[in-house]
Amino acid sequence: MANMVNCTEVRPGNVYIWDNQLYMCQLIDLNKTAMAKMKVKIKSKNLRTGSITEVSLIGGDKVELVHVDKRKMAYLYDEGEAICFMDNETYEQLSVSKVLLEWELNFLRDGVEVEIMTYNGEILGLTMPAKVTLHITESAPAVRGDTSKTALKDAILETGLKIKVPLFVEEGDDVVVSTETGEYVSRA
């Protein structure tokens, strides 16, 4: 049974279907004037494409609220075209296509725990932890004299991601990296 609600009842974090697309509400703006019907603008993320869009509705429009399953799973191994994850409680394994994980591949290593979102068996994507610890496999030597501002050098992580790190960080060190921006946070 569909859970149809008035579009004014949608809140940030809710997942809804509009125009046969699956959206997650990020921000809602209600605008009511004395002369016109209420205008509802919902800033939403399309969960299938990842694009951010603004859905414009009128006060009486109905949308279908849906439940998206979220499961904590750990990175297991690379299958070539997909990545295998395992539920640590049930030991059930799930393969996710690399096409859905372009950015996330920069931070995946053995044991990293992620949250996988599914809707009716369809994998929508995954949520990474805010920060992960990665190993530096290659680092440029420190160059003296470039200290007019914060001195940084290039480093390549075990996943192949290239980041800027402070001069004191060496090849072989473990560093904490933000999964949102891909930037160095601290030494581990």
Image (cartoon, rainbow, N blue to C red):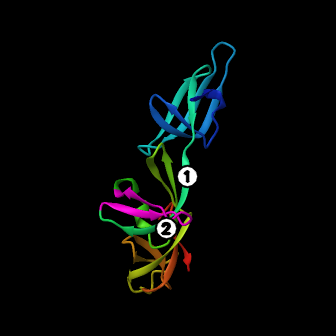
The answer to whether residue 47 is above or below residue 115 is above
Q: Which residue is mark 1?
A: 70
Q: Examine the structure image and report whether residue 93 is included in the region drawn in magenta.
A: yes
The C terminus is located in which quarter?
bottom right
Q: Nearer the viewer, residue 21 or 74?
A: 74
Question: Would residue 148 appear left or right of 81 to someone viewing this image?
Answer: right
The residue that appears at 34% across and 54% down in the rendered structure is 99
**How far from the left and from the top, in percent, is residue 103?**
41, 59
Amino acid carrying label 1: it is: Lys
Identify the residue at image location x=69%, y=15%. 34
Is residue 23 visible in the rendered image? The answer is yes
Q: Residues within 10 Å of mark 1 (few under 14, many from 20)?
A: some
Residue at (67%, 21%) from the top-left corner?
32
Regarding residue 149, the answer to whether it shows in the image is no
The x, y position of residue 63, in whole percent, is 56, 28
Q: Which residues are magenta?
A: 81-98
Give the mark, 2 or 1, whose residue is nearer the N terminus: 1
Q: Residues within 10 Å of mark 2 (few under 14, many from 20)?
A: some
Q: What residue appears at the point 51 percent right and 34 percent down from the top-left corner?
A: 54
| Nearer mark to the viewer, of 2 and 1 | 1
Answer with left or right where residue 94 lies relative to residue 1: left
- Asked if the stretch drawn in magenta spans residue 83, the answer is yes
Residue 36 vs residue 9, the one in the foreground: 9
Residue 170 in the image, given as x and y percentages of width and height: 45, 86
The image's mark for residue 183 is 2
Disc 2 secondary structure class? loop
Identify the image quadrant of the N terminus.
Answer: top right
Of the numbered discs in the image, which one, if any, rests on residue 98?
Answer: none
1 lies above or below 51? above
- Secondary structure state at the residue bearing disc 1: strand
